[in-house]
C-alpha cells in the first residue's frame, strides 16, 4: 500500500483526546484514521451490495424487452386477480 502524507485540521481539544486514545490503543493517529475511514467505506459497500438471496437469484429470469417494472407488476396483478 502506497502511503501519502495528509494534513488535517480539527479542534485542539479533539486532537488532544485523539492522541490520548491512540496512545491507549497502542497505535498512531494515522493508523486510527486509516482504520476509521476503512470501516466507514466497508459499511457503505455492504449497504450498496445486494443481499445473498438477491445475488443467487440474479439472472434466473429473463424479462421481456420494452416493458417497465411497473408494466410487469400491473400485468401480474391483473392475471392474478382476473382484471
Image (cartoon, rainbow, N blue to C red):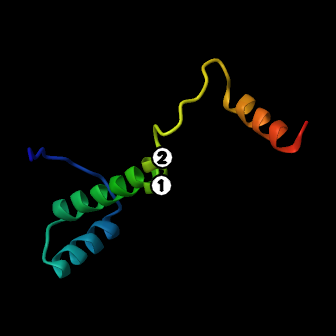
Q: Is residue 21 left or right of residue 60?
A: left
Whether residue 10 sits left or right of residue 67 in the image: it is left
- Report the disc number at residue 53: 1
Q: Residue at x 73, y 32 (%)?
A: 70
Q: Is residue 83 visible?
A: yes
The answer to whether marks 2 and 1 mark residues whose Cβ atoms lie closer than 8 Å is yes
Residue positioned most to the right: 83
Nearer the observer, 7 or 73: 73
Task: Residue 30: give its label.
Answer: none
Residue at 10% x, 47% y: name it. Answer: 3
Give the image location of residue 35, x and y in percent. 24, 61
* 35 in relation to 60, above or below: below
Where does residue 28 sit, x and y in percent of width and height?
A: 14, 67
**Most foreground residue, 29 or 46:** 46
Which quarter of the rendered picture does the C terminus lie within?
top right
Q: Is residue 48 left or right of residue 69?
A: left
Image quarter of residue 17? bottom left
- Report the residue at 64% width, 17% height from top: 66
In this rendering, the answer to whether 72 lies above or below 1 is above
Mark 2: which secondary structure?
A: helix
Q: Write down the quadrant of residue 40 in the picture.
A: bottom left
Q: Horizontal and vertical percent for residue 67?
A: 67, 23
Residue that lies at the very extreme toward the left in this rendered image: 2
Is residue 49 among the parts visible in the rendering?
no
Label 2 crowd bin: few (<14), some (14–19), many (20+), radius 10 Å: few
Q: Say how many tags the image has.
A: 2
Which residue is more in the foreground, 21 or 38?
38
| Other residues around mark 1 within 10 Å, as few (<14) / some (14–19) / many (≥20) | few
Q: What residue did someone put label 2 on?
A: 57
Q: CA distance from mark 2 to mark 1?
A: 6 Å
Q: Residue furthest bottom?
A: 24
Amino acid at each position: 500500500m502506497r502511503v501519502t502524507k495528509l494534513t488535517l485540521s480539527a479542534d485542539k481539544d479533539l486532537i488532544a483526546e485523539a492522541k490520548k486514545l491512540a496512545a491507549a490503543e497502542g497505535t498512531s493517529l494515522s493508523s486510527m484514521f486509516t482504520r476509521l475511514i476503512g470501516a466507514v467505506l466497508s459499511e457503505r459497500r455492504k449497504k450498496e451490495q445486494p443481499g445473498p438471496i438477491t445475488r443467487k437469484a440474479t439472472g434466473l429470469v429473463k424479462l421481456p424487452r420494452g416493458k417497465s417494472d411497473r408494466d410487469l407488476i400491473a400485468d401480474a396483478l391483473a392475471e392474478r386477480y382476473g382484471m
